[in-house]
């Protein structure tokens, strides 16, 4: 007897290939089984979505190809497949594209023999007795809970809706995550599998300290393999090992970035999304999904699956906990509507207070000053007392542009409509969009002028200038102050991030200069002064989300100061600005996020912007800007009359802010609606129209197109 499994493979929606492909198999294959199948001249990894006993209508046995091999792994469960199918539908991507992107890259390359060897080694390592380690024991209890923490945990146990933990920086949210995870892991599993938890962070640099805390708390009880990580900074072999451990139930806790929302966790009972407001949870390439929103959906799917089990009345549920000191306005609005349960922790641990905010009016400071003299003096005082300072500038490199003031030449990128950034340490001009790098020219390439100079400031320049300004500052032992920098350039090498964090925690560094990567999530106990050097750049941006991002960044940065309750009263947050009367700073001075959120939501409602309206972007990349815009405008014209069109507004095509990257022109078209359902109906009906528009003569030169649902950058 033959079967005709329906298999999804990594075929993008715009390829025109169907959602799944039919193959032939002599054995019945359970849905979720991983298989290797022929696709053209290649053999690729696929996931069985269905396995009927009859061939599809109009397809004979001679027209199908057999499944090449079956991977000896437990099938991906129905909840995982439902999550992938939903993500594909909602974000207008192929289910196979989402499914295969969610699997570790090395799994796509291994054949059945190689995988069997890998599984054998992993099982042997998991069953090996620890050498010199004590036997598993009860997990450490951790510090005593505050009243607020205890109330939040009690409310979380009975919560029937997604929970939004609105906790001030330093209020002990991580301890709540640890205790909630402990409660879940102590519960009995179902189907012979232990319970599991997923903890997500927005950036890789936040995983080391969180991983250390989770290992310290749970490895004594559950063993060395209980906690695994999943993020793009791992090697392919590491990612495969972590994924297999989670998929087979060996790992009880998975820590990861946005990609971890698709991890196969058959015993999942808790999803924690730390710093849920962070835009890093929204993917900007491939399937442009929001990991935060998918986490909420996944918890619902897992809960429904548990409720369908026998003895459903006593079935547990999968809880999702979104945590932040500055929640996204979408989540805040959902809590206002009652769709989320808001849990408040306004107090800092130990009774500490948030730092005092000091606005520095740069109109009254010496002309050309990078750092105001009073701020430098305050830093010297802190260094003399053995305390640490943090300086935030969200721009890496030495200067954003190198310019000739004689002829007007600027260090533009020949492949992008952007400037190359001047990096002084290696004397290069580097494009942060396409990566094109050249040595700094000795003279202006246009006029030969030797006097070319940097314009603007980046973290390298601030680090250099601070080292000069603090040259006379002395630590309590009389040694000179040490200034360090932490950004994407300084942490590029493997292990460099951990080394820099260790130096800061040990007190070797007195002043740390960095980008937004240092402003959130870190627990720096000795920092008592935080300074934002250039906060004004986002005050008047065209992006409607710019005020929200700036307020969150400054409030998160302020939270790095005074985390030791004994020093919190003397901690300060300095903000240098040319516009001290701006309403945003009035709210920031009081750390009044609810008031700020209410004002922003009122503005959004008046303009029917998210979360009161719903958006999607159709993006097009082409060899010429004319071809990109012609494709978009043709797609808009042919979208008239499609289902849901009467509730849709289609705007004309426009170039992106940076319209050329790597010699590819980029344009976009905004789609808006007051109804999410109407927008989804329209986008689903629009997909075949977009495929047809690729063949239009005026769209010749189109490279690719993509639909971005719920975009963050408009």
Image (cartoon, helix red, strand yellow):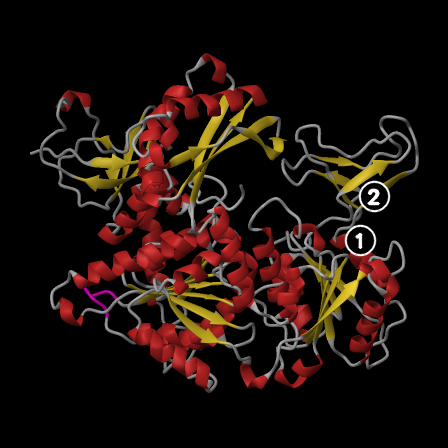
Magenta span includes 665: no
Return the residue nearer the eye: 452 or 535.
Answer: 535
Task: Tell me the residue at 44%/86% (across/down).
Answer: 147
Q: Is residue 435 visible?
A: yes
Q: Earlier in the sequence, mark 1 or mark 2?
A: 2
For the record, the magenta segment spans: 189-193
Return the residue nearer the eye: 371 or 223.
Answer: 371
Q: Classify 605 as above or below 659.
A: below
Is 532 on the left-hand or right-hand side of 77? Answer: right
Q: Dot 2: what SS?
A: strand
Q: Is residue 278 visible?
A: no
Tell me the CA gap for discs 1 and 2.
Answer: 10 Å
Return the residue nearer the eye: 677 or 396.
Answer: 677
Main SS, magenta region, reads loop
**Residue situated furthest right in the rendering:** 450
Number of numbered callouts drawn: 2
Task: Tell me the residue at 78%/65% (across/down).
Answer: 360
Q: Which residue is mark 2?
A: 454
| Label pair 1/2, CB-CB below 8 angstroms | yes
Q: Which residue is mark 1?
A: 461
């Amino acid at each position: 007897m033959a079967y005709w499994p329906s298999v999804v493979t990594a075929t993008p929606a715009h390829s025109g290939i169907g959602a799944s492909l039919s193959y032939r198999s002599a054995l019945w294959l359970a849905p979720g089984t991983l298989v290797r199948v022929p696709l053209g001249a290649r053999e690729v990894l696929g996931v069985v979505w269905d396995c009927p006993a009859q061939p599809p209508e109009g397809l004979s046995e001679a027209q199908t190809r057999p499944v090449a091999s079956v991977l000896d792994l437990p099938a991906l469960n129905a909840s995982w497949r439902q999550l992938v199918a939903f993500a594909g539908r909602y974000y207008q991507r192929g289910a196979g594209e989402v499914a295969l992107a969610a699997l570790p890259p090395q799994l796509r390359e291994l054949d059945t023999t190689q995988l069997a060897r890998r599984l054998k080694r992993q099982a042997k390592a998991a069953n090996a007795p620890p050498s010199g380690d004590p036997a598993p024991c009860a997990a450490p209890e951790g510090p005593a809970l505050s009243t607020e923490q205890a109330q939040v945990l009690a409310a979380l146990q009975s919560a029937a809706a997604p929970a939004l933990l609105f906790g001030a920086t330093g209020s002990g949210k991580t301890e709540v995550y640890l205790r909630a995870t402990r409660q879940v892991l102590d519960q009995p599993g179902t189907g012979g599998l232990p319970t599991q938890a997923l903890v997500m962070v927005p950036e890789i640099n936040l995983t080391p300290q969180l991983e250390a805390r989770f290992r310290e708390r749970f490895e004594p009880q559950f063993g060395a393999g209980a906690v695994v990580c999943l993020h793009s900074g791992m090697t392919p072999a590491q990612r495969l090992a972590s994924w297999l451990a989670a998929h087979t139930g060996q790992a009880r806790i998975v820590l990861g970035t946005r990609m971890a929302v698709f991890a196969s966790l058959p015993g999942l009972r808790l999803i924690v999304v730390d710093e849920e407001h962070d835009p890093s949870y929204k993917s900007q390439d491939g399937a442009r999904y929001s990991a935060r929103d998918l986490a909420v959906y996944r918890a619902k799917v897992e809960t429904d699956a548990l409720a369908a089990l026998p003895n459903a009345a006593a079935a547990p549920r999968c809880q999702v906990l979104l945590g932040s000191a500055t929640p996204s306005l979408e989540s805040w609005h959902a809590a206002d509507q009652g769709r989320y349960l808001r849990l408040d922790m306004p107090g800092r641990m130990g009774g500490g207070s948030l730092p005092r905010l000091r606005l520095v009016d740069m109109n009254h400071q010496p002309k050309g000053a990078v750092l105001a003299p009073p701020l430098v003096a305050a830093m010297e005082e802190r260094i003399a007392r053995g305390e640490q300072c943090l300086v935030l500038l969200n721009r890496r490199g030495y200067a954003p542009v190198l310019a000739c003031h004689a002829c007007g030449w600027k260090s533009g990128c020949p492949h992008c409509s952007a400037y190359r950034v001047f990096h002084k340490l290696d004397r290069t001009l580097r494009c942060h969009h396409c990566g094109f790098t050249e040595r700094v020219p000795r003279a202006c390439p246009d006029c030969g002028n030797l006097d070319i100079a940097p314009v603007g400031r980046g973290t390298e320049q601030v680090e250099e200038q601070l080292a000069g300004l603090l040259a006379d500052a002395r630590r309590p032992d009389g040694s000179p102050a040490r200034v360090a920098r932490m950004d994407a350039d300084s942490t590029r090498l493997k292990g460099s991030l951990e080394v820099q964090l260790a130096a800061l925690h040990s007190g070797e560094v007195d002043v740390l200069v960095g980008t937004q990567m240092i402003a959130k999530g870190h627990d720096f106990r000795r920092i008592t002064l935080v300074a934002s050097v250039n906060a004004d750049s986002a005050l008047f941006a065209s992006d409607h989300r710019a005020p929200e991002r700036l307020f969150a960044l400054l409030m998160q940065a302020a939270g790095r100061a005074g985390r030791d309750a004994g020093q919190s009263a003397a901690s300060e947050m300095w903000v240098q600005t040319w516009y001290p009367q701006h309403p945003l700073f009035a709210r920031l001075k009081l750390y009044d996020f609810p008031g700020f959120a209410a004002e922003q939501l009122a503005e959004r409602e008046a303009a029917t912007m998210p979360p009161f309206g719903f958006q999607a972007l159709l993006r097009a990349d082409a060899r010429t800007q004319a071809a990109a815009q012609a494709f978009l405008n043709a797609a808009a014209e042919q979208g008239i009359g499609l289902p849901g069109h009467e509730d849709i507004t289609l705007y004309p095509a426009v170039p992106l802010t940076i319209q050329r990257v790597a010699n590819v022109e980029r344009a976009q078209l905004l789609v808006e609606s007051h109804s999410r359902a109407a927008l989804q109906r329209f986008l689903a009906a629009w997909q075949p129209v977009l495929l047809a528009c690729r063949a239009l003569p005026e769209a010749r030169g189109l490279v690719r197109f993509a639909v971005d649902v719920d975009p963050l950058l408009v």
